[in-house]
Image (cartoon, grey):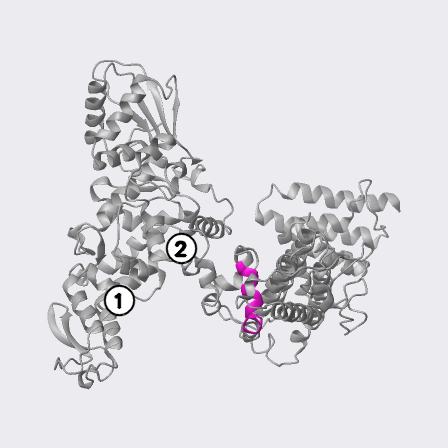
Amino acid sequence: MTSCSMSVTWMLRMRWGRQHCMSPARMGTKRHGQRDTAQILLLRGAKYLPDKNGVTPLDLCVQGGYGETCEVLIQHHPRLFQTIVQMTQNEDLRENMLRQVLEHLSQQSESQYLKILTSLAEVATTNGHKLLSLSSNYDAQMKSLLRIVRIFCHVFRIGPSSPSNGIDMGYNGNKTPRSQVFKPLELLWHSLDEWLVLIATELMKNKKDSTDITSILLKQKGQDPGATSISPFEPSGPGSCGNLSTGAGESQPDALAGSQEASADGQDVVAMTANRLSAVIQAFYMCCSCQMPPGMTSPRFIEFVCKHDEVLKCFVNRNPKIIFDHFHFLLECPELMSRFMHIIKAQPFKDRCEWFYEHLHSGQPDSDMVHRPVNENDILLVHRDSIFRSSCEIVSKANCAKLKQGIAVRFHGEEGMGQGVVREWFDILSNEIVNPDYALFTQSADGTTFQPNSNSYVNPDHLNYFRFAGQILGLALNHRQLVNIYFTRSFYKHILGIPVNYQDVASIDPEYAKNLQWILDNDISDLGLELTFSVETDVFGAMEEVPLKPGGGSILVTQNNKAEYVQLVTELRMTRAIQPQINAFLQGFHMFIPPSLIQLFDEYELELLLSGMPEIDVNDWIKNTEYTSGYEREDPVIQWFWEVVEDITQEERVLLLQFVTGSSRVPHGGFANIMGGSGLQNFTIAAVPYTPNLLPTSSTCINMLKLPEYPSKEILKDRLLVALHCGSYGYTMA
């Protein structure tokens, strides 16, 4: 019998090991072969025993995601069902394999499906209560809880004939068998609710003269060393929430009291509990969401957030990163995010940038895939002489997911590839997007920024081009590439979904903006202006009277409603007149940048993200430059170089930066944050032996200027300027 049991494990191991090298079609065959092998061996009386390393046949099956074979093992050994459920807590097992196994088992029958869900809910509830016990290991329990809940939600969604409309899928008052699988979790949600209520109560008790609940520090009293839990709810039996205890005989209010009797190492109770409670809140949100149609937020969860608004704001204010760690609902639900936005916007810009990119790339298999070798079919082959049109055509047909992971560009008839070419491509397209020949954008009043052209319809492809422009800016932001273009404040607001105001009108019509300002600043009651909520404007080349609101032509502007008039006029000039163009641009932009993430910034910060700093700080440049191949900072050639950089114009400095790095802009944070082909890469100057008339060259992938050892400052300046003015495009590649 023992040899037969060893055969079970050996056969499963051999089939599992070989299968990783097989095609999907053969894998299907092998799955059936493995199942049949196990069935035959078990029918012949093989024992279920682990091998010499303690690995069981079930371990091997789950590791390989073999649901059919697991089904056979459970049929012969029913106790293994609970073993599989308990495996969801093992972080060494791949989650997708566990899902695959449980997905197969749940498809066998409705009763099996409900049994799996109920068992998972019970395990999740147990783990959740352990997490709320402050003496437990936070990191391990948090990961375990969220892992189990993710698997639970996945199985719930894919069950046999699973509903898709939320009618019997959730906390909607229905008592269907499917809604009952959530019943074990109600104990955990009740504990969560009580924790938050208790914290809110203690916060209010200790509020004293402060009106800011988030500024209160609560101190916890010393805990009995023998205590195993200070969770307020330790279930003492089925359906029971137990006593509100700390595990040391104290009442929960005493444990949370903000008294002066705190222990020597008294800790902030909010700090101690925030992450734990936030993880349970995330689990609650996941369970609520899996019962709703896609894109809808559970009414129960919205009610929960509103009820505990102050405590949740306290958590976010203390540690805004909780939003990205656990409060995903804020990023997915604009109506909830608006309640916390003032806290988020108060965080340092640098921190928000880090969160932005961390979350933007969190779903990608490799956030640095832009630097990996790419398939020849994924290379964007564009024509330099028709770069805008050819790029538009190619990008519109490209796979968005692949473009998010990495970009490879090659100009037709040229050999160069790499990050230098990619940056050149973005740089040229930045100029082409605002090329007046396409009539997409028009210059602002001061000539330095651009605004969508309300007459862009003269170009029959204008909306497709606006969509392409949005894709290019979205791609640039996704890959931290700077664009050589600046927009009006109002257009940045449109990208962010921020309402425009009358001051934004000044960018396109300063005189009109002054008139609006005058109306707001003066009493217009007796001036006889006879303004109505209707204005004359250009509509497809002809002047027409356009109502600002229904019946606007018969509504007079008065002292009482003039603010509304000014706002509506502003929206007409700055938004309604270019709404199709804005919509097309955002359609392309949001293919790569989710609206929920970009709203972390204001219009000024978005400009920095997209275009970098408008000025070049030479001192910062010098400070963040490295030297190689024999050069040192004190060498005469290096001294002359920096003197030349100080002497040349700002435009020539931009050309120099572009010549060496492929980008004409400095990223936010200065030269210390310049990106190279493999991440952050300082500006570098390398020595090259001098020969007469030799020009400087560059390797844009590593931000390296190859500077000959010129015999004088005058020759250095002459050769450098020739290189800059003659070689700003077609960068030398490493």
Looking at the image, tell me whether mark 1 or mark 2 is earlier in sequence order: 1
Which residue, as the protein is rendered here, is positioned at the far left? 542
Q: Position of residue 500 (x, y in %)?
A: 29, 65
**Quadrant of the image occupied by residue 578:** bottom left
Check if residue 733 falls in the magenta segment: no
Q: Main secondary structure of the magenta part?
A: helix
The answer to whether residue 232 of the structure is visible from this angle is: no
Report the front residue among 623 and 656: 623
Query: Label 1, on which residue?
Result: 579
Residue 326 vertical position relative to residue 502 in the rendered view, above or below: above
Q: Which residues are magenta?
A: 304-317
Report the front residue among 185 and 552: 552
Q: Which residue is located at x 18 percent, y 70 percent?
A: 518
Q: Which residue is located at x 25 percent, y 36 percent?
A: 654
Query: Label 2, on which residue?
Result: 593
Q: Position of residue 133 (x, y in %)?
A: 73, 60
Sort mark 2 into few (<14), some (14-19) or many (20+) by Cα contacts within 10 Å.
many
Check if residue 305 falls in the magenta segment: yes
* Secondary structure category for the residue under label 2: loop
